[in-house]
Image (cartoon, helix red, strand yellow):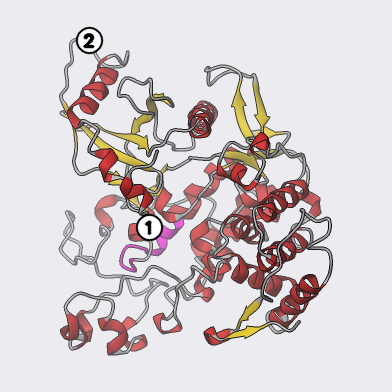
Amino acid sequence: MPFADQANGEPPTEFVYTLEPKALAEYALSVRSSDPSVPEGETFQCIAELPPIFGRKNVVFSITFSDGARWALRIPYPPYSELIQDRMRADIATTRFIQARTDVPIPKIHAALPTVDSPIGVPFILMDWARGVCLEDVWYDRKWRTEPRTRGVIESLAPHMAALNALEFPSIGTLIPQNTDPDSTTWSVGPFIDDRNEMVPNSANLNKCGPYNSVHAYYVETIENAARRLQSRHGRAQLALLRMLSSTLPSFEFDGPPFVLNHPDLCAKNVFVDPATGVITALIDWDGVNTGPRQSGCARYPSWMTKDMNPFRYTWKATYGDFLKEPVQSVIQTRAPSPVPPEDVPQPGPSREPTAAGATNEEPDRDPFTFDWNESLSSSDASSWFDGGDDASSSKSSIEIIRTEESPTELGLLRKTYLAFMKLMYPSLASLTERSHISEAIERAIFDPESRPMIISKLFEELVGPGSAWWIARTVRKGLWNGTWLSNGWVGPVAGGAPPTEVLSGGEVEEADD
């Protein structure tokens, strides 16, 4: 049963108060002390730091040891259903499977149990703390993101994606181990084990989504399962449009196996980098890892380069200006990164204090990322970004803009840079990368109902161009609404309701014609 604060949509602090930090630290200490790699006779002390970090599905305690080592203890929020425990079991086994076969930098798991019968009384995963800094914290800092660091991010990410590409599977679903040995060769791909099964109203179908032998079958059944949950004719009309697009836009050349393991959420907050070079040091949050199409997984653009494909959650404004002026040519022209010594590179953040080597954080004149924020922002725009109220706009030369979005132009240039590097180093994947943002958008629209209408409009732009996309999408949806396909035989009976509304530019709403 959920705690009261969970029912209100808040982090379950009430549950966390039931956890004893001293007991958590003692268990972590026992795990490390029993590690065969620890020299005999060496002793440690450790603490579970407070407050913990509250995530969307887990609470994370930082376990710090007396010798400086740091681990993360991840505990999922209750209630602990059989589905959650099965999902954790699959995640743990699949993570160890990847670690045993690749050099993908996933923090090492030291201990894990997916049941309440664990030594600490709750399901948990005890793993290394991710090294480096979170990419989301530095990517939008124009002082940090110089060309060498951007090159470091791109040139270190692509090989990890290529490593995942080497692990091939015959179908789309969840990787199921036949035993607990990560080196075992007896693995199978079974049905998805996650909350997508809630899309199937009949509880007898739990855990029966998949496996699938083609991308087309995966899209069609997943969309139809989503439609079965809806009684809204309007919602089903949207999903019918999405079903049509999913059968049109992805290339059928790559419809069948082999399939690969895909990171479920390759966004900047799940990527850690060396602050000096930008080289990736950790890829975290593999919860829900499954096998799937290359074009929406290892061959796709990183999600921070495709934000404009989800207009509902994309918050860039034209007044922000463009940070990136041209593709990062050094990524395209060189086959290997040129590491920059840490002492020669300013650390992230707005500080202009001298570095250890005596250098300052001034940007070189040749930096292609140079951008004059003061000329591009009005004082009212600038003041809204900073603490300090009205005084913030009175001294424009001291303003440091911290953005969390990039313009469509910048995103297009970043994709062009990433694609060029993939063509140079991994040409077999590059043919999938070029259109991978389409597949990613389709999957996002399936599982994000709030974003679905605007993503569908964006996909129509990809199909017919921006000029007539909205009109064609509106016309097709009206036809679906007025026809009999939605109510007869697609995914079962559907309730009636008001005609769909169309969201126009500028936020106006227009009732669709009957």
In this rendering, the label closer to the viewer, 2 or 1: 1
Above-or-below relation of 301 to 262: below
Q: Position of residue 121 (x, y in %)?
A: 32, 24
Above-or-below relation of 445 to 506: above
The residue labelled by disc 2 is 40
The front one of 256 and 312 is: 312
Magenta residues?
Answer: 141-151
Q: Position of residue 402 (x, y in %)?
A: 31, 70
The answer to whether residue 255 of the structure is visible from this angle is: yes
Q: Position of residue 79 (x, y in %)?
A: 41, 36
In the displayed structure image, the side of residue 217 where residue 293 appears, left or right: left
Marker disc for residue 192:
none
In the displayed structure image, the side of residue 19 where residue 435 appears, left or right: right
Q: Quadrant of the N terminus?
A: top left
Q: Position of residue 93 (x, y in %)?
A: 51, 26
**Marks 2 and 1, Cα distance to the nearest angstrom?**
40 Å
Q: Would you say residue 368 sits in the magenta stretch? A: no
In the displayed structure image, the side of residue 465 where residue 315 appears, left or right: left
Which quadrant of the figure has residue 127?
top left
The residue labelled by disc 1 is 136
What kind of residue is marked 2? Glu
Which quadrant of the figure has residue 258?
top right
The front one of 31 and 399 is: 31
